[in-house]
Amino acid sequence: MTMQPSGNGKLHIGIATKIAFVAWLIALVTLFIFVAMTIPQQKKNYLESLNSKSNSVAVSLYDVAAGAAINDDLASVVSACQTLLNGDPEISFLIVTKNDGFSLVNQQSGWRVEPEIGDFWVPQNRVAKGNIVTVPLLDQEAYHYSKPFDYSGIQWGWIHVGLSLDRYHEHVQLLYRNTLILTLACIFISLLCAILFSRQLVRPILNLRHIVEQVAGGDLSVRAEENRKDELGSLSSSVNTMITNLIRRNQVLETVRFSAQHFMQVHFWEDAIDPVLEKFGKATEADRVSLFLNGADSVGEATLNLRCEWHGKKGTSCLNMPDLQMKSYPDAGLTSWLESFEKKQCLWGQVDELSEEEKTLLESCGVQSFIAAPIHVAENWFGFLRVDSAEKRQWTGAELDSLLAIAEILGTTILRQQDRSALVDAKQHLEERVEQRTFELKRQVEAKEQALDELAEAQSSLVEMSRAAGMAEVATGVLHNVGNVLNSVNVSCNLIVEQLNKSRVENVEKVAELIKENEQNLAQYLTADERGRQIPEYLISLAPVLKKEHSLIANETASLRERIDHIKEIVSMQQNYGQVYGVYESITPSILMEDALRLNEDSLLKHEITVNREYEKVELIVTDKHRVLQVLLNLVQNATYACSYSKNATKIVTVRLSAHGNDFVAFQVQDNGVGIQPENLTKIFHHGFTTRKDGHGFGLHSGAITAKELGGSLTVQSDGIDKGATFTLILPTKREDVHVV
C-alpha cells in the first residue's frame, strides 16, 4: 500500500490502500453490528434467568404463605423464608406484605416486622414483574421481583423476592471483557486480511499502470501478461491491443511527417510521390495505394486518371486498366464519389456495401475495403488518393486522418509548384517593368531635383525680396521723413532769400559811395550839403531795421541747421539698418521699438493717433536687428491702418516691452482699431491673406517666418470686429547657436 503526495501538495492515497480500507471498514461495521446485537441479548438472557429464579422462589414461598394466611401462622412464614435465604446466598431478601402495609422483612442478616411499609411494596397493578432497582426500604440495588399473593379469590398481599446482583455484574463484566478481546482480535485479523486481499487484487492493476507509464514515456516494446481469465485479463489484453494500435498509429503518423519533408525538399511533386505512397502503404499494411488525377473529356466533364500507384505482395498493378484511364466519373459508376470529393469529403468502407457499379469497378482491382481522400489545390478539386486492401478490415481514424493530411500536403505542394511557375513568369515581367519603372523614376528624380533647385532659388529670392521689401519700407519712411524736413528747409530758405531781397544793405552801400566821393570834404558835406545832412539820420534809422533783419535771418539759419541735422540723423539711421544682413548682435529692445515708431511718426501724426509706451526693464536681446525692425514696422503700420479706419473718436496705439519667462522678451503692439474677425485669426499669417484693399498678404506671413527663424514666435489676439487687436512678437535674449558681433 502506498500514499504519495500529489502535484498540488495533497496526500494521494493509492487504490490498494483504498480497497484495504474499504474491506476493513466493512469487517469493522459487521463486527460492531454483531457486538451491538450480542451484548444486549446476553444481558437480556441474564435478566430472564434472574426473573425465572425469582419466580421459582416466590412460587415455593407461595404455598407456605397460603397456609399462614389461613392459620395466621407468621412463624412458619418466617421459618420458610429463612430456610430459603440460608439455602441460596444469592437471595438478598424475601418480603411478604399484606395489602394493609403489614410486612415480614427477611434478610440474610435476620428478619423483622414492618407494621406499615411504603407504597413501593404495594403496587396498584397486580401483575408479576421483575427489574433491577434500588430498594427503598433496604437502600440497596437488587433484582426485585414482585408477585401478587391471592388465595381463594382474596387479594391477600404481595410476595417480594430480591436477588443479589453480584453474579449478574460478574457475568456482564466477563461478557464485556470477552467481547472486547474478540473485537480487537477481529479488527487486527480483518485488517491483515484486507491488506493481503487488496495487494493480491491490485498487483495486476499496478503492473498495468507501470506498463501504461512506460508506454506514455515512449516505450512501446512492453507488453502486459495475459494469464488471467477474469476482467483484469481482458484489461491486459486491451492494453496490449492499445500498444499495438499505438505502434501502428505512430507509423501512420510518421508517414505524414515523411510526406511533408519530402514534398518540401523537391521542386516537383512528381519526384516525391512514389516514396510517399510506399511509406503509407507499408505503415497501414495496405495492399495498394493509388493516386488519381482529374482530367477533362471533350465535353468538359471530369475524368478518372490513375497516375501512379504502389502495391504490396498481395496487390497487383492497375495502371493498365482502361476503366481507370480517361474515363468520366459517371461512366465509371463513381458519380457519388464525384459529389463527395467536390465537397471535400472522404470515403471509406467495405466494397460489398457499395452500389453494383462501384463494386464491379473495385472488385476488378481485387479491392475488398478502401479509404479515399480528395486532393484540393486552393479551392479546385485536383484528384484523390485511395488506399486498398484485398481483405475486409476496419480502417482507424488515424489512418483516415493521415491520408487526408497527405492529400492536403500534396495539394499544397502542387499549389506551391504552380505559384513558383507563376512567380518565375511574373519575375520576368517584373524585371521588364522594373527597368521601365526605374527609367521613369530616374526622370522623376531629375525633374524633382530641378524643381528643388528652382524652389531653393525661389526661396532665396523670396528671402531677398522680404529683406528688400523691409528695407524698402525703411527707405520709404526715411525718404518720407527727409521729404518733410526738406519742405521745412525750403520754407526757411525762401524766407531768407525773401528777406535778403527786401534788405536795405544796398542803401548802406550807396551811403558808403557818397561818403567815399566826398571823402576830402566829408565834414562840410555832412553839414552843408543837403543830402549829406540826411546820411547820419538815415544811418540812425537804418540800424534797428538791419538788426531786425539780422535777427530774422539768424533765426531762420538756426532752424535750417536743425532741419539739416535732422536729415543727417534720419540718413544715419538708414545707414545703420542698411548694414550687412543676417548679423546677430546684442541690442536694447526699446531702441528697436522707438526706431519703428520714428519711421511711422508722420503717419501716426497724420491720423491723430496717440502712442502709449509701456516699457518694462528687460534684458538685451541677441538678434538680427534689421529683420526685427521689419517685423515691428509692419506691426506699427498695420496698427496705424486699423486705427485710421476705426470709428473711435480717440485712436490709440499702445506699444509694450516685457519679460516673457526667463529667457525671452515680448514686443507687443496693441490698437483700438477695426479688429479681426474670429474666423480670420487662424488665416491671418497665411501667405497671400489680407483684409486690406491695397495689401499684398505678405507682411504678416513673412513676419511669422522671421520670428520663427529668430527663435521666437508671432501671435495675434482679437475679440472681434471693432474690438482692436494685439500682436505679440516674442524673441529670445540669448542665442548659443549663432555668432554674436
Image (spheres, rainbow, N blue to C red):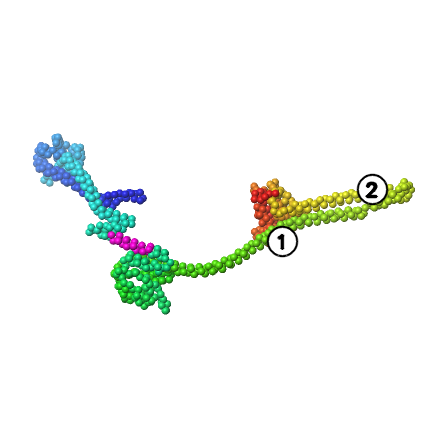
**Highlighted range, magenta:** 240-258
Residue 366 point in image, percent of width and height: 26, 63
Dot 2 lies on which element? helix
Residue 277 point in image, percent of width and height: 31, 59
Q: Which residue is mark 2?
A: 543
Snapshot quadrant of residue 63:
top left
Residue 255 colored in magenta in the image: yes
Q: Amino acid at mark 2?
A: Ala
Picture layout, residue 437 above or below residue 632: below
Query: Does residue 710 appear anywhere in the picture?
Result: yes
Which residue of the protein is positioned furthest toward the bottom in this rendering?
298
Which residue of the protein is positioned furthest toward the top in this rendering?
109
Which is nearer the eye, 214 or 126?
214
Residue 508 point in image, percent of width and height: 84, 44
Picture layout, residue 624 above or below residue 257: above
Residue sitting at x 72%, y 49%: 487
Our reading of the magenta stretch's main secondary structure is: helix
Q: Which residue is mark 1?
A: 695
590 to the left or right of 342: right
692 to the left or right of 532: left
Picture layout, residue 150 above or below residue 346: above
Dot 1 lies on which element? loop
Marks 2/1: CA–CA distance: 61 Å
Snapshot quadrant of residue 585:
top right
Which is nearer the eye, 634 or 612?
634
Picture layout, residue 62 above or below residue 625: above
